[in-house]
Image (tube, rainbow, N blue to C red):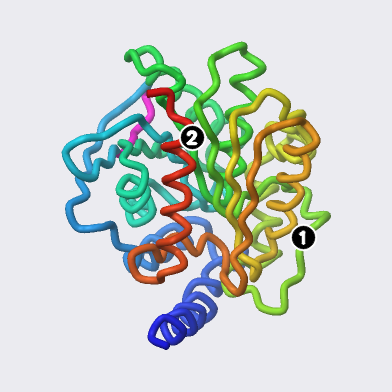
Amino acid sequence: MLQHLLEAGLRQTMTRLVRPLLTPALPVSLQRTLIAQAYRSSIPPRGSLFTKEILATVPVTRCQYGESTRGVILYLHGGGYIIGSSKTHRGLTGHLAKTSGCEVIAPDYRLAPEHPFPAALEDALAVYQSLLSQGCNAGDIAVAGDSAGGGLTITLALRLKELGLPLPSSLTVFSPWTDLTQTNLYSPECEPVLQEAWTEKAATLYAGKEALTNPLISPVFGDLSGLPPLLIQVGSEEILLNDAERLAKVADRDDVEVRLEVYNSLWHVFQVHSGQLERATTALEAAGRHIKAHLAG
Protein backbone atom coordinates (compact mmCIF):
# COMPACT_ATOMS: atom_id res chain seq x y z
CA MET A 1 0.00 0.00 0.00
CA LEU A 2 2.82 2.43 0.90
CA GLN A 3 4.56 1.78 -2.42
CA HIS A 4 1.30 2.35 -4.28
CA LEU A 5 0.88 5.71 -2.55
CA LEU A 6 4.51 6.61 -3.19
CA GLU A 7 4.14 5.77 -6.87
CA ALA A 8 1.03 7.95 -7.12
CA GLY A 9 2.79 10.78 -5.33
CA LEU A 10 5.85 10.61 -7.56
CA ARG A 11 3.64 10.60 -10.65
CA GLN A 12 1.95 13.76 -9.47
CA THR A 13 5.29 15.36 -8.68
CA MET A 14 6.59 14.63 -12.16
CA THR A 15 3.37 15.87 -13.77
CA ARG A 16 3.11 19.09 -11.79
CA LEU A 17 6.75 20.04 -11.18
CA VAL A 18 8.95 18.45 -13.86
CA ARG A 19 6.82 18.25 -17.00
CA PRO A 20 6.04 21.99 -17.01
CA LEU A 21 9.79 22.73 -17.07
CA LEU A 22 10.33 20.70 -20.23
CA THR A 23 8.84 23.18 -22.65
CA PRO A 24 10.31 25.16 -25.53
CA ALA A 25 8.69 28.24 -23.99
CA LEU A 26 11.53 28.36 -21.43
CA PRO A 27 15.08 29.31 -22.46
CA VAL A 28 17.42 26.32 -22.45
CA SER A 29 19.65 27.98 -19.85
CA LEU A 30 16.70 28.27 -17.46
CA GLN A 31 15.63 24.69 -18.15
CA ARG A 32 19.11 23.52 -17.16
CA THR A 33 18.98 25.40 -13.87
CA LEU A 34 15.47 24.31 -12.91
CA ILE A 35 15.89 20.65 -13.88
CA ALA A 36 19.13 20.49 -11.91
CA GLN A 37 17.12 21.50 -8.85
CA ALA A 38 14.40 18.95 -9.61
CA TYR A 39 16.96 16.13 -9.79
CA ARG A 40 18.07 16.82 -6.21
CA SER A 41 15.30 14.43 -5.13
CA SER A 42 17.17 11.57 -6.86
CA ILE A 43 19.55 10.42 -4.13
CA PRO A 44 22.50 8.01 -4.50
CA PRO A 45 22.89 5.21 -1.96
CA ARG A 46 24.79 5.97 1.21
CA GLY A 47 28.46 5.10 0.69
CA SER A 48 28.68 6.25 -2.93
CA LEU A 49 31.93 8.06 -3.71
CA PHE A 50 32.05 10.66 -6.49
CA THR A 51 35.22 12.19 -7.92
CA LYS A 52 35.76 14.52 -10.86
CA GLU A 53 38.49 14.43 -13.48
CA ILE A 54 39.19 15.04 -17.16
CA LEU A 55 39.39 12.25 -19.72
CA ALA A 56 40.45 13.23 -23.25
CA THR A 57 39.51 16.89 -22.57
CA VAL A 58 36.01 15.81 -21.41
CA PRO A 59 34.97 16.43 -17.77
CA VAL A 60 33.72 13.22 -16.17
CA THR A 61 32.40 12.13 -12.79
CA ARG A 62 33.52 8.76 -11.47
CA CYS A 63 31.26 6.91 -9.07
CA GLN A 64 32.25 3.97 -6.91
CA TYR A 65 30.17 2.05 -4.41
CA GLY A 66 32.00 -0.12 -1.93
CA GLU A 67 35.68 -0.99 -1.90
CA SER A 68 35.90 -3.38 -4.82
CA THR A 69 34.73 -2.77 -8.37
CA ARG A 70 34.57 -5.12 -11.32
CA GLY A 71 34.53 -3.45 -14.69
CA VAL A 72 33.59 0.04 -15.80
CA ILE A 73 30.29 1.48 -17.00
CA LEU A 74 30.44 4.46 -19.33
CA TYR A 75 27.16 6.18 -18.45
CA LEU A 76 25.65 8.74 -20.84
CA HIS A 77 23.08 10.98 -19.15
CA GLY A 78 19.79 12.05 -20.67
CA GLY A 79 18.24 15.46 -21.20
CA GLY A 80 17.39 15.74 -24.88
CA TYR A 81 21.03 16.59 -25.68
CA ILE A 82 20.33 20.09 -24.32
CA ILE A 83 20.11 19.73 -20.52
CA GLY A 84 21.34 17.38 -17.80
CA SER A 85 24.78 16.52 -16.46
CA SER A 86 26.71 13.94 -14.52
CA LYS A 87 25.61 15.79 -11.37
CA THR A 88 21.88 15.56 -12.11
CA HIS A 89 22.27 11.81 -12.59
CA ARG A 90 24.23 11.01 -9.42
CA GLY A 91 21.27 9.18 -7.93
CA LEU A 92 20.92 6.91 -10.92
CA THR A 93 24.66 6.30 -11.42
CA GLY A 94 25.14 5.69 -7.71
CA HIS A 95 22.49 2.99 -7.62
CA LEU A 96 23.81 1.48 -10.86
CA ALA A 97 27.29 1.30 -9.34
CA LYS A 98 25.77 -0.51 -6.37
CA THR A 99 23.75 -3.05 -8.37
CA SER A 100 26.48 -3.74 -10.96
CA GLY A 101 29.56 -3.70 -8.75
CA CYS A 102 31.22 -1.53 -11.41
CA GLU A 103 32.82 1.86 -11.37
CA VAL A 104 30.56 4.27 -13.28
CA ILE A 105 32.06 7.05 -15.37
CA ALA A 106 29.61 9.75 -16.48
CA PRO A 107 30.92 12.30 -19.00
CA ASP A 108 29.69 15.86 -19.16
CA TYR A 109 29.51 15.76 -22.93
CA ARG A 110 28.94 19.02 -24.79
CA LEU A 111 25.30 20.07 -25.13
CA ALA A 112 23.25 21.68 -27.89
CA PRO A 113 22.41 24.29 -29.01
CA GLU A 114 25.92 25.57 -28.28
CA HIS A 115 27.40 22.29 -29.49
CA PRO A 116 25.10 20.41 -31.91
CA PHE A 117 25.73 17.00 -33.48
CA PRO A 118 28.26 15.39 -33.55
CA ALA A 119 29.71 17.00 -30.40
CA ALA A 120 28.02 14.65 -27.89
CA LEU A 121 29.01 11.59 -29.92
CA GLU A 122 32.58 12.83 -30.32
CA ASP A 123 32.91 13.33 -26.56
CA ALA A 124 31.47 9.90 -25.75
CA LEU A 125 33.85 8.33 -28.27
CA ALA A 126 36.82 10.25 -26.85
CA VAL A 127 36.10 9.05 -23.30
CA TYR A 128 35.67 5.45 -24.48
CA GLN A 129 38.96 5.58 -26.38
CA SER A 130 40.64 7.12 -23.33
CA LEU A 131 39.52 4.16 -21.22
CA LEU A 132 41.01 1.79 -23.79
CA SER A 133 44.28 3.74 -23.86
CA GLN A 134 44.47 3.53 -20.06
CA GLY A 135 44.48 -0.24 -20.29
CA CYS A 136 40.80 -1.11 -19.90
CA ASN A 137 39.82 -4.08 -22.02
CA ALA A 138 36.69 -3.52 -24.06
CA GLY A 139 35.27 -6.68 -22.49
CA ASP A 140 35.47 -4.97 -19.10
CA ILE A 141 33.56 -1.89 -20.29
CA ALA A 142 29.77 -1.61 -20.47
CA VAL A 143 27.92 1.38 -21.91
CA ALA A 144 24.60 2.58 -20.54
CA GLY A 145 22.40 5.65 -20.74
CA ASP A 146 18.93 7.09 -20.37
CA SER A 147 16.68 8.97 -22.81
CA ALA A 148 18.96 10.93 -25.18
CA GLY A 149 21.86 9.20 -23.45
CA GLY A 150 20.21 5.89 -24.33
CA GLY A 151 20.17 6.87 -27.99
CA LEU A 152 23.76 8.05 -27.64
CA THR A 153 24.68 4.67 -26.17
CA ILE A 154 23.51 2.97 -29.37
CA THR A 155 25.07 5.54 -31.71
CA LEU A 156 28.38 5.23 -29.87
CA ALA A 157 28.33 1.49 -30.51
CA LEU A 158 27.51 2.12 -34.18
CA ARG A 159 30.39 4.59 -34.45
CA LEU A 160 32.80 2.15 -32.79
CA LYS A 161 31.73 -0.48 -35.31
CA GLU A 162 32.32 1.95 -38.19
CA LEU A 163 35.82 2.70 -36.93
CA GLY A 164 36.68 -0.96 -36.36
CA LEU A 165 37.28 -0.37 -32.65
CA PRO A 166 36.55 -3.03 -30.03
CA LEU A 167 32.96 -2.95 -28.82
CA PRO A 168 31.89 -2.86 -25.18
CA SER A 169 30.69 -5.97 -23.38
CA SER A 170 27.04 -4.86 -23.23
CA LEU A 171 24.62 -2.00 -23.79
CA THR A 172 21.87 -0.91 -21.35
CA VAL A 173 19.35 1.80 -22.15
CA PHE A 174 16.56 3.34 -20.09
CA SER A 175 13.68 4.96 -22.04
CA PRO A 176 15.97 5.46 -25.07
CA TRP A 177 15.32 8.26 -27.56
CA THR A 178 16.06 6.48 -30.82
CA ASP A 179 13.97 8.31 -33.45
CA LEU A 180 14.36 12.08 -33.44
CA THR A 181 12.04 12.46 -36.45
CA GLN A 182 9.11 12.22 -33.99
CA THR A 183 7.08 10.32 -36.61
CA ASN A 184 6.20 7.31 -34.45
CA LEU A 185 5.70 8.69 -30.96
CA TYR A 186 3.47 6.70 -28.65
CA SER A 187 0.31 8.31 -27.25
CA PRO A 188 -0.17 7.11 -23.67
CA GLU A 189 -3.26 8.02 -21.68
CA CYS A 190 -0.92 9.64 -19.18
CA GLU A 191 2.54 11.16 -19.86
CA PRO A 192 3.92 12.57 -16.60
CA VAL A 193 7.28 13.82 -17.92
CA LEU A 194 7.73 14.61 -21.60
CA GLN A 195 6.04 17.07 -23.92
CA GLU A 196 6.14 16.39 -27.65
CA ALA A 197 6.85 20.05 -28.43
CA TRP A 198 9.92 19.93 -26.17
CA THR A 199 11.41 16.78 -27.70
CA GLU A 200 10.74 18.17 -31.19
CA LYS A 201 12.61 21.39 -30.37
CA ALA A 202 15.45 19.49 -28.71
CA ALA A 203 15.80 17.29 -31.80
CA THR A 204 16.22 20.27 -34.10
CA LEU A 205 18.68 21.96 -31.74
CA TYR A 206 20.80 18.82 -31.55
CA ALA A 207 20.70 17.75 -35.20
CA GLY A 208 21.47 21.19 -36.59
CA LYS A 209 21.96 20.83 -40.33
CA GLU A 210 22.07 17.02 -40.24
CA ALA A 211 19.13 14.87 -41.31
CA LEU A 212 17.16 13.50 -38.37
CA THR A 213 17.20 10.09 -40.10
CA ASN A 214 21.01 9.88 -39.83
CA PRO A 215 21.56 6.60 -37.90
CA LEU A 216 24.14 8.39 -35.74
CA ILE A 217 21.32 10.69 -34.63
CA SER A 218 18.36 8.29 -34.79
CA PRO A 219 19.84 4.80 -34.36
CA VAL A 220 16.53 3.06 -35.07
CA PHE A 221 17.39 3.68 -38.75
CA GLY A 222 20.79 1.99 -38.42
CA ASP A 223 22.24 -1.47 -38.98
CA LEU A 224 22.74 -2.87 -35.48
CA SER A 225 24.34 -6.14 -36.59
CA GLY A 226 27.36 -7.08 -34.53
CA LEU A 227 26.42 -4.95 -31.53
CA PRO A 228 26.81 -6.43 -28.02
CA PRO A 229 23.93 -7.75 -25.89
CA LEU A 230 21.32 -5.07 -25.30
CA LEU A 231 18.91 -4.49 -22.41
CA ILE A 232 16.09 -1.98 -22.96
CA GLN A 233 13.87 -0.74 -20.13
CA VAL A 234 10.94 1.60 -20.69
CA GLY A 235 7.75 2.71 -18.94
CA SER A 236 4.31 2.26 -20.45
CA GLU A 237 3.37 5.87 -19.61
CA GLU A 238 5.71 7.68 -21.99
CA ILE A 239 5.78 8.93 -25.55
CA LEU A 240 9.07 7.09 -26.16
CA LEU A 241 7.56 3.63 -25.66
CA ASN A 242 7.55 3.09 -29.44
CA ASP A 243 11.19 4.20 -29.64
CA ALA A 244 12.12 1.40 -27.25
CA GLU A 245 9.95 -1.23 -28.92
CA ARG A 246 11.19 -0.33 -32.41
CA LEU A 247 14.80 -0.46 -31.21
CA ALA A 248 14.16 -3.97 -29.87
CA LYS A 249 12.66 -5.04 -33.21
CA VAL A 250 15.61 -3.65 -35.18
CA ALA A 251 18.05 -5.35 -32.83
CA ASP A 252 16.20 -8.65 -33.20
CA ARG A 253 16.15 -8.21 -37.00
CA ASP A 254 19.91 -7.71 -36.98
CA ASP A 255 20.53 -10.76 -34.73
CA VAL A 256 21.54 -8.76 -31.68
CA GLU A 257 20.87 -10.41 -28.32
CA VAL A 258 18.18 -8.13 -26.90
CA ARG A 259 15.79 -8.03 -23.96
CA LEU A 260 12.96 -5.50 -23.72
CA GLU A 261 11.39 -4.81 -20.32
CA VAL A 262 8.23 -2.68 -20.25
CA TYR A 263 7.22 -1.48 -16.78
CA ASN A 264 3.48 -0.92 -16.68
CA SER A 265 2.17 2.39 -15.32
CA LEU A 266 5.66 3.88 -14.94
CA TRP A 267 7.06 6.93 -16.65
CA HIS A 268 10.10 8.22 -18.52
CA VAL A 269 13.37 7.18 -16.81
CA PHE A 270 11.58 6.09 -13.65
CA GLN A 271 14.90 4.54 -12.59
CA VAL A 272 15.89 7.93 -11.12
CA HIS A 273 13.64 6.97 -8.18
CA SER A 274 15.73 3.90 -7.34
CA GLY A 275 16.18 3.54 -3.61
CA GLN A 276 12.71 5.00 -3.03
CA LEU A 277 10.39 3.26 -5.48
CA GLU A 278 10.70 -0.52 -5.26
CA ARG A 279 10.02 -1.11 -8.96
CA ALA A 280 12.73 1.39 -9.89
CA THR A 281 15.17 -0.39 -7.58
CA THR A 282 14.17 -3.73 -9.10
CA ALA A 283 14.77 -2.36 -12.61
CA LEU A 284 18.29 -1.24 -11.73
CA GLU A 285 18.98 -4.60 -10.11
CA ALA A 286 18.03 -6.22 -13.42
CA ALA A 287 20.31 -3.79 -15.24
CA GLY A 288 23.13 -4.64 -12.86
CA ARG A 289 22.69 -8.36 -13.52
CA HIS A 290 22.70 -7.79 -17.28
CA ILE A 291 25.94 -5.81 -17.07
CA LYS A 292 27.69 -8.28 -14.74
CA ALA A 293 26.64 -11.25 -16.87
CA HIS A 294 28.51 -9.95 -19.93
CA LEU A 295 31.70 -8.57 -18.44
CA ALA A 296 34.73 -10.48 -19.65
CA GLY A 297 36.29 -10.91 -16.24
Magenta-drawn segment: 57-61
Instruction: Read off the residue under disc 2.
Output: 143
How far, Cα to Cα, is label 1 from label 2? 25 Å
Quadrant housing residue 100? top left
- Specify the label residue 250 is tagged with: none
Kindly identify the residue that appears in the image at 56 percent across and 46 percent down. Answer: 173
Tell me: residue 42, above or below residue 232.
below
Kindly indicate whether the residue at mark 2 contacts the one at mark 1 (C-beta within 8 angstroms).
no
Kindly identify the residue that appears in the image at 26 percent across and 31 percent down. Answer: 53
User: Between disc 1 and disc 2, whose residue precedes?
Assistant: 2
Amino acid at pointer 1: Leu
Task: Give left or right: position of 280 versus 212.
Answer: left
> Quick one: which residue is furthest to the right in this view?
183
Instruction: Read off the residue under disc 1.
Output: 185
Task: Give left or right: position of 245 versus 77.
Answer: right
Is the residue marked by circle 2 packed among few (<14), some (14-19), or many (20+) residues within 10 Å?
A: many
Kindly identify the residue that appears in the image at 40 percent across and 66 percent down. Answer: 273
Task: Give left or right: position of 216 versus 269.
Answer: right
Work out whether residue 230 or residue 152 is closer to the camera in this orientation and state it.
230
Q: Quadrant of the N terminus?
A: bottom left
Amino acid at pointer 2: Val
